[in-house]
Image: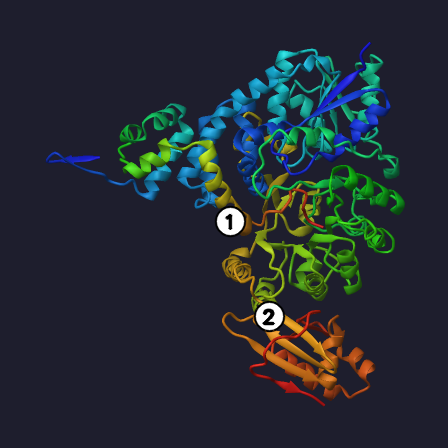
Amino acid sequence: MSRFRVVFVYAPFGSSTYPALGISQFKTALYNENIECDILYFNLEFAKKIGIQLYEALVKIPHHLLFCEWLFSSALFGENSSADSDFVREILWGEYPDFFSPSVMYNIMRIRDMIPDFFDTYADNVDWSQYGFIGFSSVFQQQCASLALAKRIKNRFPDTKILFGGSNCFGSMGENLPDLFPFIDFVCTGEGDIAVLALAKAIVDGDIAPVIPGIVSRVENSVLTHSASLGCNLDSLQYPDYKDYFSQLNGIEKPEGFSYQVLVETSRGCSWGEKSQCTFCGFNGNDLTFRSKSPDRIIEEVRYLSQMYGKNISFTDNILAKSYFNHVIPALASIPGLEIFLELKGDLTRKQASLLAAAGVKRVHAGIESLSNSILQLMRKGTNLVQSLQTLKWCKHYGVTVNWNLLYGFPGEDPVEYQKMLELIPKIIHLTPPRGPNHLRFDRFSKYHRDPAAYGIIRLTPKNAYKYVYHSLSPHDIETQCNIFDADYNDQSELYEKDLTNAVREWQSYPEADFNLFKSGNSIHLVDTRTRGETREYLYSGLAAQIYLCCDAARSVESLINRFQVSSDEITTILEQFLSERIIIKSGNNYLSLAIEMSEPDTHYINSITVRSE
Amino acid sequence: MIIIDEVEFDTMASEKEMYEIIGRAVADEKFREALIVDPKKAVVTLGYSLTEEQARSLKESEIGKISEELSSRISKMGTVCGIAGVALMGPC
């Protein structure tokens, strides 16, 4: 007798550059329960159809446009030329007319036209009847494609059971799905590790209406909602089985430079957010509680996955826990050849940055978000400007690339803060520029969504794009499904948006900018190319050099007096000189030197020297 | 295309008109199909005309060929719009 068999589908527009983590963990767990599990990377099939290069370009279109969802909406709901026309004119051409040029849109429409047939063919070519259930993992912009394929499968095989899960199904979004889309039988509305396994076992046992925490189920024409899903001990999770991804990826022609990432999950929740959720963050649904695998388990898992699948490791954690610097990060250095990406808070110490580099961390996403202390306080980020700049500076020193966002438009912000940023940016133009700048987004599960009135938000309404993508749903139903909202509040961003954008563009367009520090005995030599077409050099020795080096981490005048046992006047005279030469910044009572310390020999010719010495 | 004294002059659809033409193609599947078959002829129904180059750019479009153009445009958009290097990235 053949074993019970289930399948999970990973739909477009999940990126083709990494496997699906959750369902790959389910696969191992199910196998241990004597249940066979296939994973069909439908996203790779679509990527193959249109080419990976184009596919990945489309994945990167900003999510708030819902472009990738719209691409599949006709495959789900049927044609609606009026909605399509409004979507293109209002959403795409309204925000990015230059990018969605006529020729680009024309070709996108041609791609869109072939999608329903492509879905039909895929639905026809798989024997779905062999599976006890068909699960769809839906995160980010995978919902319309997942629904469109599920609908076709149910039409062809009415007895099959359809399961939906993933972050697009968290909480009330998932609870409403079976009512809105009657071809769905089960929805996992939270973590699925325990719930999905229990569901599979119940179906094996012939229970068609299992009562499982975290699973919404349809019985006859009723939808039954049970209690929230149970969280598991992360050490009890199985290692993910990524073999389906790699076998299906092998069948696709890849563009030059294509690289994949091996996903590793070491924690869930947010170690900062469980104490003080950042106001704009909607990650983690309703549960920010931080849970982590044990250090030994993490190292074992990274070692195993890197040996099995490759050294290009991406941690899926929302934030790197500080405790990892005690054991996990140093231990990772013992695994040779790793190239790690991870996300962290923008408050690294120099020591932590060096540990990351030694562990093979090549790229990080740092939660910097703003260059204003008061705006960071508004969003309850728990960091400040000098911490952010230190993170950028030390990561550059140790060769760790930083991605970060510059957000604006926060309720309650003072536009004057952006004027201060415009004055700051030329001084820090040698540090990695942000992406964007981007207007703040109002996400489901964020504090703005939970309690808008507390932030002066009069009303939140689903982003307009939803009504064109989900054109067959009522406004109320759309509200239950949407992730991103428009907010009615006193948004003052028009006052500074253009100037801020221009300043950031200038920053992004000048990667050659450097400001380097070379040590030589008791002296320091600074080489400054932060101004286009100009090289300025400074040589300091004695107390001035010592103060500059000491301010590598931000220092107050008082701490410098204590350190060097000299008068306040002597210290402030030197600091004022540094400030006038734009080689240091002052934030609050603290002074931070801006030059990046270089380890290689100083080979620069000194053209013009400013000397400050004892 | 305007015919004056047996001489043909191509008149180029302006950028705004190109948006109108494609806007119509988005909303009208039949027009879209007509545009694929014979772009110059299709746009006449809207009162516009295309140069040979404009017509060719529509006629010769193939998914493979547009890949480069789209990815190049959207890569630039990535810089402008703040797109994560990987979809996993988010606030932290």
- Assess disc 2: are there few (<14), some (14-19) or many (≥20) residues with their C-alpha within 10 Å of its C-alpha: some
**Label 2 lies in what chain?**
A
Residue A297 shows in the view: yes
Q: Count numbered badges in the picture.
A: 2
- Assess disc 1: are there few (<14), some (14-19) or many (≥20) residues with their C-alpha within 10 Å of its C-alpha: few
Q: Residue furthest top?
A: A1
Residue under numbered circle 1: B76
Q: Is residue A12 left or right of residue A223?
A: left
The amino acid type of the residue labelled 2 equals Lys
- Residue A88 position within the rendered picture, expressed as x and y whole percent measured from the top left: 46, 36
At horizontal 74% and vertical 71% (from top left) the residue drawn is A554
The amino acid type of the residue labelled 1 equals Lys
- Residue A494 position within the rendered picture, expressed as x and y whole percent measured from the top left: 51, 56
Q: Is residue A257 left or right of residue A220?
A: left
Occupied quadrant, residue A266 = top right
Residue A292 shows in the view: no
Residue under numbered circle 2: A427
Occupied quadrant, residue A481 = top right
Q: For the residues marked 2 and 1, what is the alpha-carbon distance in whole angstroms?
A: 25 Å
At horizontal 76% and vertical 76% (from top left) the residue drawn is A550
Q: Which mark lies nearer to you, 2 or 1?
A: 1
Q: Secondary structure at mark 2?
A: helix
Please state, as top left, top right, bottom left or bottom right, where the C terminus of chain A lies in the image. Answer: bottom right
Q: Nearer the viewer, residue A245 or A567?
A: A245
Instruction: Tell me whether the residue at label 2 lies in contact with that at label 1, contact meaning CB atoms closer than 8 angstroms.
Output: no
- Residue A303 position within the rendered picture, expressed as x and y whole percent measured from the top left: 82, 43
At horizontal 82% and vertical 24% (from top left) the residue drawn is A30
Q: How is the image coloured?
A: rainbow
Q: Nearer the viewer, residue A534 or A366?
A: A534
Q: Secondary structure at mark 1?
A: helix
- Residue A451 position within the rendered picture, expressed as x and y whole percent measured from the top left: 70, 45
Q: Is residue A579 left or right of residue A217?
A: left
